[in-house]
Image (cartoon, rainbow, N blue to C red):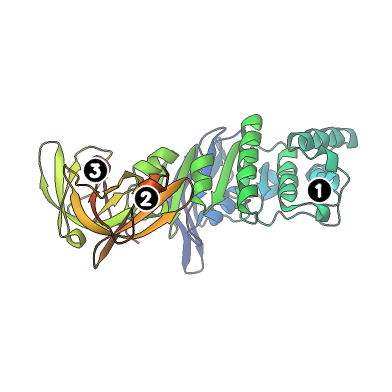
């Protein structure tokens, strides 16, 4: 196992800056995810760890060893690509053994290692089959086995599940996590899928426009986003522009133009993100925190509205409430049966609990 330390990393392609001034320390045995939209710099960063790209500026270290310009074949990393990059004319055994053959390992040791890793990925019965005859999920397991068989210090996965259907993605998420825990290997995972990031990671780095916006555990990223981009990208949220009007004992008050009213917010680090007086501010409140009722509600932050749409998803019910011509808020509740669903067009009351609101600055580009 290795730690990975990226220090003041910048990567430019001509005049385009793909990654800018990145500092990250990934711990031994950690499952660390690079998360963000397409073109945000996450895959470029992974490729600098792998050695496929060298940084324009900065240092890449594995443990205390400077790897900045060490070629990929000398880094002892295993990589799983989005398209698997398997050899279709080879059998499962030959694909998995390829890296060991390049390393000139003996046939006996190669056979032992390949058979062992194929058992662990539950493909030992397919050892002699052509990979072109395997399903997408099975091909993904072959790609994992090929990366793991060389006993890498670091496992790198570049959107490995994006080509699979939803049910198979769920199964493979569990499989990758099982193998990562079994091998106790430092793993860096690239994805744009927030569910993958939240369910699999020890920690997450959220990228946008080549900059790392926030690093934290899944619960920190979800519950304490540092700006409006992270709040909106991770999960669903109701986002409103606000201005601070008063800071009192234990709570702060903000004006929201679109609500044409003021919001009370509990004055804690969980509710108030870091910002300066020059920052534009947003209020973020998750749909599961929004209370929607056709009965009067008491307390702070209660506003009238009209049900615009009710969306049934099975486990949950999303209620879209039109507050006025400029604003629709969504509340999400667990499905408790048809008798609890609100009707479209119904007049309702919406409460935004003051201890469930997060105030954050708008992200700079």
Q: Earlier in the sequence, mark 3 or mark 2?
A: 2
Give left or right: position of 281 versus 41: left
Identify the residue position indicated by label 1 in the image: 95
Image mark for residue 143: none
Which is more foreground, mark 1 or mark 2? 2
Question: Marks 3 and 2, Cα distance to the nearest angstrom?
Answer: 21 Å
Viewer-side residue, 32 vs 305: 305
- 232 horizontally vs 121: left or right: left
Which is closer to the viewer, label 3 or label 2?
2
**Apparent side of residue 132 relative to residue 166 in the rendered image (left or right):** right
In percent of width and height, residue 180 lies at: 63, 35
**Circles 3, 1 touching at the beta carbon (< 8 Å):** no
Tag shown at residue 341: 2
Pick the residue in front: 218 or 349. 349
Q: Position of residue 264 (x, y in %)?
A: 16, 45
Looking at the rendering, in which quadrant would you find the C terminus?
A: bottom left
Q: Nearer the viewer, residue 324 or 296?
A: 296
Q: Secondary structure at mark 3?
A: loop
Quadrant of the image containing the N terminus: top right
Pick the front one: 324 or 32: 324
From the image, tell me which residue sits under label 3: 353
């Amino acid at each position: 196992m290795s730690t990975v330390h990226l220090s003041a990393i910048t990567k430019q392609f001509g005049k385009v800056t793909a990654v800018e001034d990145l500092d990250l320390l990934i711990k031994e045995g950690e499952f660390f995810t690079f998360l963000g939209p397409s073109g945000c710099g996450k895959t470029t960063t992974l490729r600098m760890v792998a050695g496929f790209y060298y940084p324009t500026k900065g240092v890449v270290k594995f443990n205390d060893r400077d790897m900045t310009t060490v070629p990929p074949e000398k880094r002892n990393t295993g990589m799983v690509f989005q398209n698997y990059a398997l050899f279709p004319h080879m059998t499962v055994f030959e694909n998995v053994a390829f890296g060991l053959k390049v390393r000139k390992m003996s046939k006996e040791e190669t056979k032992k290692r390949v058979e062992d890793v194929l058992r662990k990925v539950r493909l030992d019965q397919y050892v002699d089959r052509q990979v072109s005859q395997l399903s997408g999920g099975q091909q993904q397991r072959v790609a994992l086995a090929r990366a793991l068989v060389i006993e890498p210090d670091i496992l790198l996965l570049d959107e490995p599940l994006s080509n699979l259907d939803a049910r198979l993605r769920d199964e493979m998420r569990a499989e990758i996590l099982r193998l990562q825990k079994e091998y106790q290997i430092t793993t860096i995972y690239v994805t744009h899928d927030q569910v993958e990031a939240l369910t699999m990671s020890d920690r997450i780095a959220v990228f946008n426009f080549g900059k790392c916006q926030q690093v934290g555990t899944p619960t920190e990223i979800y519950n304490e986003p540092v700006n409006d981009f992270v709040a909106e990208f991770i999960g669903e949220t109701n986002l409103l522009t606000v201005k601070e009007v008063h800071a009192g004992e234990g709570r702060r008050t903000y004006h929201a133009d679109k609500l044409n009213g003021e919001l009370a917010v509990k004055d804690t680090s969980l509710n108030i993100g870091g910002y300066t007086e020059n920052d534009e501010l947003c209020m973020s409140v998750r749909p599961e925190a929004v209370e929607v009722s056709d009965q009067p509600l008491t307390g702070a932050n209660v506003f009238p509205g009209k049900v615009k749409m009710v969306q049934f998803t099975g486990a949950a019910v999303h209620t879209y409430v039109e507050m006025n011509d400029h604003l629709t808020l969504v509340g999400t509740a667990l499905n408790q049966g048809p008798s609890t669903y609100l009707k479209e067009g119904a007049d309702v009351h919406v409460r935004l609990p003051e201890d469930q609101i997060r105030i954050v600055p708008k992200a700079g580009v």
